[in-house]
Amino acid sequence: MIQVTQLSKSYNGTTVLKIDNLEIKKGESFGLVGNNGAGKTTFFSLLLDLIQPSTGYIKNNTFQVDKTEEWKPLTAAFLDETFLIGYLTPEEYFYFIGDLRGQNKADVDALLVKHTEFFNGEILNSKKYIRDFSKGNQKKVGIIATLIGNPEVIILDEPFANLDPTTQFRLKKIIKDLASDPNVTILVSSHDLQHTVEVSDRIVALHKGEVVKDIQTSTETLAELETFFAV
Amino acid sequence: MFKKFLYLEWKAFVRSASFGTNLALKIILGIVAFMYAIIFLFAGVVLFYGLKDANLDPLLEVNKYLIYYLIFDLLFRLFLQKIPVLNIRPLLTLPIKKATIVNFSLGKTMLSFFNLVHAFFFVPFSIVLLVEGYNPLNVILWHVAIMSLIYVNNFLNILLNNKDSLFVIFMVIFGALGVLHYYDYFNITDYTVGFFQGLITTNYLFLIPVILIITLYVITFNFFKKNLHLDTGLSSKHDIAKTEQFTWLDQFGNIGTFLKNDIRLIKRNKRSKTTIFMSVLFLFYGLLFFSGGIESYDNPMMKMFAGVFVSGGFLFTFGQFVPSWDSAYYPLMMTQNISYKGYLNAKWWLIVIATGVSTLLAAPYLYFGLETYLIIIAGAIFNIGVNSHLVLLGGAYVKTPVDLNSSKGAFGDKKAFNLKTMLISLPKMLLPMLIYIAGYKFISPNAGLILVALIGLIGFAFRNKVFSMIEKIYKAEKYSTIASYKQKS
């Protein structure tokens, strides 16, 4: 589904990301871990064509992301609050994304009903604009919006950060459900090793912009990662 | 402690986004500020002798209109002067006495541009009064009283806390007083001139403003000290949100999708609301030209200039910042499968609708004759056909993020001016003026109007071509646009 070839990104001569070859298969649940500055967000930004690669390229479902826009209809992402429109209510935001992704109001409503539990009664009909929500609740809105229109690739940057424990459990369930769908490829980055291990079948660790671990999740994975990061 | 505060202020000043631009811009800004200072200085001196030449008592005239001056100053502050409460937050948990924090914050507002600018006028004026042999003590008392009144405005603005509705109320009062005065129904200056005149003729009346300012300072101080908590004085207002679907716009397809958002954008954000305010202001701008009150404006070329401006307020203030209005969520837009054409079309329609409405609202200009209104209509057609394209084209090169929640910089952001935008902006005004004057001089006044309108209609035909051009610019500039929108000011 996603093919990374000879990819690198440098700013003023400092290389912040360098991945020679990485393939993410269709239906895979892919976890990206690493310390601050390891290049996780840079990688996702390159994948979404928000920044330009210094060398190499990424192909998303055979479409090279910096050459065509054909990958956009099948990809959904939530990286940070710049993916939210602050002056809208959550409902308006969901319908707007729905409009852009060819979903009518009923489709969006059905999805929202499915995730009522995740919203925990704090999102819908709240008489608040998204800009006035807490960070955690904003994140809930952004995460659910990525599910609108059944995208084939879902990219979530640090989805667990700022969420309360209950919501973290619920999010894990949502991601696991998505991962069990063979048509959905899901990419999640996190600082939290345990969460990532729980929801991903494959984990890649980045360190200073390079891939240092690439493992299929097993019972030993968490211990292996913990030893690696405990320095 | 104050020394540390000043250190923070200095850092905030030199590291602010607007200051961090290139050296050339800093120099230009410096020159502009200097020029304004000089103009004000001269105004203080020239006004005195100008009034004297007109056989009026300068001091009496100034005292007469001071009431308008003060109301207008308050209006100006309500609209533009911000209260620096946000920078207080990090100080709250540090071991600093609350009184110190409040005193410093209030002291900071006293040094703001909004207060200092008046000194440029009143200091030279007072000096002239002294030179002209007025009693030094009385001049000084008068000066102290006026400065106190200016600072009364400063603290009133803080207490009123930028309430938008108050702004409208004061505006109405100001307008009503002006109109009543002009038509000789009620002249407020008759009632106030005595007081202001008393400030200089007596040795005790000045105490009233001085006592007023001291009281207000104490009230403001206590108010802030009591409310120095995150959920009271330092809280930011949360609006009660209502989901608005505008389902009737669904019939317009993807244009409707964007149009809905643009309407919400304008309705719900301070900064974008000012574009509406500006369009109303621009409506009145034409009065300067069409009423024939100012001699140098009373010629066909300047009238065409005004004709373009009267209906173009929204066009200029809104269009200039497309796509910057969407800067806060530009990464979202760039990862969604949006149609650029639909996006641009929605903005274009908004501009067209606003121009149309402004033209209708300008109908009272018929008072100055049909000819005048026809100039405005020709200008509107030109705005829709040509200027709307130029302004969107120019906007594509503006990479200044727009902070939707502040009304600061409503009168055009200085950073938004770059060479490309300037070059694209010039024809917006010059072109219709030149076309009109060519037709006016060589054929007839009406031919000039028809030519302007005709060029507007021809420009309309190029719409799709211009849109695909803008789309190409958006795509070519994508990465640098995303990067510059990230740098919050």
Image (spheres, coloured by chain):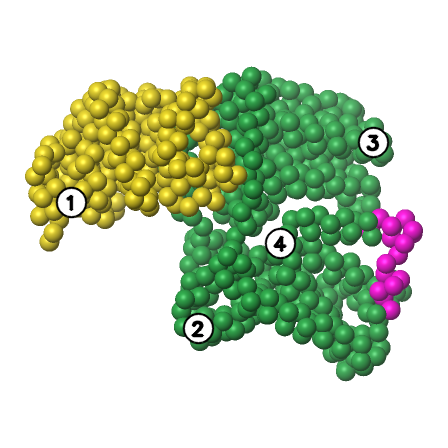
From the image, state whether disc 1 or disc 3 is nearer to you.
1
- Answer with the quarter of the image where residue A156 lies: top left
Residue B188 is covered by the magenta coloring: yes
Q: Secondary structure at mark 2?
A: loop
Tell me which numbered mark, 2 or 4, is placed earlier along the sequence: 2
- Answer with the quarter of the image where residue B481 lies: top left
Provide the chain ID for the residue under circle 4.
B
Residue at label 3?
B366
The three-letter amino acid code for the residue at tag 3 is: Leu
Pointers 3 and 4 in contact (CB under 8 A)?
no
Residue at label 1?
A207
Q: CA distance from mark 1 to mark 3?
A: 72 Å
A218 vs B314, nearest the viewer = A218
Residue at label 4?
B162
Q: CA distance from mark 1 to mark 2?
A: 42 Å
What stretch of residues is rendered in magenta? B178-194
Majority secondary structure in the magenta region? helix
Q: Residue at x 78, y 58 (%)?
A: B68
Q: Which mark is residue B96?
A: 2
Q: CA distance from mark 2 to mark 4?
A: 28 Å
